[in-house]
Image (cartoon, rainbow, N blue to C red):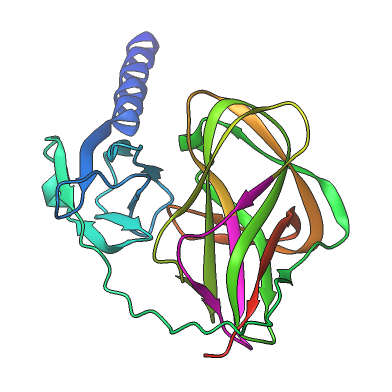
Amino acid sequence: MRKTATILMTILATFFSLIAMAQTTVTGRISNERGEAVEYATVALVGDTIGTLADAQGLFTLTIPNDKRNDLSITHVSYDRATIPYSTYSGGKPLSIIVKVKSVKLDEVVIGKKNKLKTILGKKLPGPSGSFRGKWQENRLEWGPTFKVKKDWVVSDIFFTIKKSTYSRCVLSFTIYEIRDKEFVNILNEPIYKTVTAITQKTKLAVQPTENIVLKAGKQYYVSVTIVDCDDSGILEFNSQLRSCIARHLSAGKTRKLPAGPTITLMGYELSL
């Protein structure tokens, strides 16, 4: 009798284990209304930490536990958010997702002839080295300093120092948010990407945005960096600084305040708006 009971318990344990392990794999392609691939969009379950990034061709694969019934959220700097209902993706067929370009009103920018390039966000005391590790899908974290400006500025240059990178190739993404209460509002109209190859010694990256990024007096901002693509698994080490920083989960939007983070420098010009 005891032997029979043991066998039944084992069968039941195996059964429930298989149920717990059951998963749904969602695949698809994200494109715009012209049929062009939307690279590095975030694909995530609404209200959950489960998510991934599309690749440079807009293709993605996301594995979801079967006990999850959340809708899918598709987000990208240059496009309106798209939501895919559970009933649409649960069938297992590949998804073809079309996102609409954002309609953005740009501020008029006036830079005086005598206006000189100045530091908007500079360096603080050096901290311990930081790093991104593993495959790009495994990171899903952006990290960087928070700051407030006393004048109106337009950002012209972003500087980021890498100590070492073992990736044969990786793509870094820089983002600037305005912090409104607890909401992070992306103020970019276009993504800022920088491709990095293997680096064996300290290298200062210089990134020039292709748009006018306006920072307004009295507002609080957050500038972040993350890896959105790479050819393989690796480690990217960077200089860090002792100042108020935030690590933010790309899929869930959850944040954690940290006393140190990557050293990101912003340069630009004072504005008359």
Residue appearing at x 56%, y 47% in the figure: 226
Tell me if residue 207 can be seen: yes
Position above or below: 165 against 3: below
Find out whether residue 7 is within the magenta segment.
Answer: no
* Quadrant assignment, res 91: top left
Q: Position of residue 188 (x, y in %)?
A: 45, 66
Residue appearing at x 59%, y 57% in the figure: 224
Residue at the outermost top position: 3
Image quarter in which the N terminus is found: top left
How many dots with numbers? 0
Q: Nearer the viewer, residue 180 or 93?
A: 180
Position above or below: 92 against 45: above
Position above or below: 67 against 133: below
Q: Position of residue 67 (x, y in %)?
A: 28, 43
Position of residue 191 in the picture relative to residue 89 (left or right): right
Q: Nearer the viewer, residue 106 or 169?
A: 106
Q: Position of residue 185 (x, y in %)?
A: 46, 72
Q: Nearer the viewer, residue 197 or 261?
A: 197
Position of residue 192 in the picture relative to residue 89 (left or right): right
Residue at the outermost right position: 125
Q: Position of residue 231 (x, y in %)?
A: 48, 25
Tell me if residue 182 can be seen: no
Residue at the outermost front position: 113
Q: Nearer the viewer, residue 184 or 193?
A: 193
Position of residue 212 in the picture relative to residue 256 (left or right): left
Position above or below: 131 against 260: above
Residue appearing at x 23%, y 46% in the figure: 30
Magenta region, residue range: 205-224
Residue appearing at x 78%, y 36% in the figure: 202
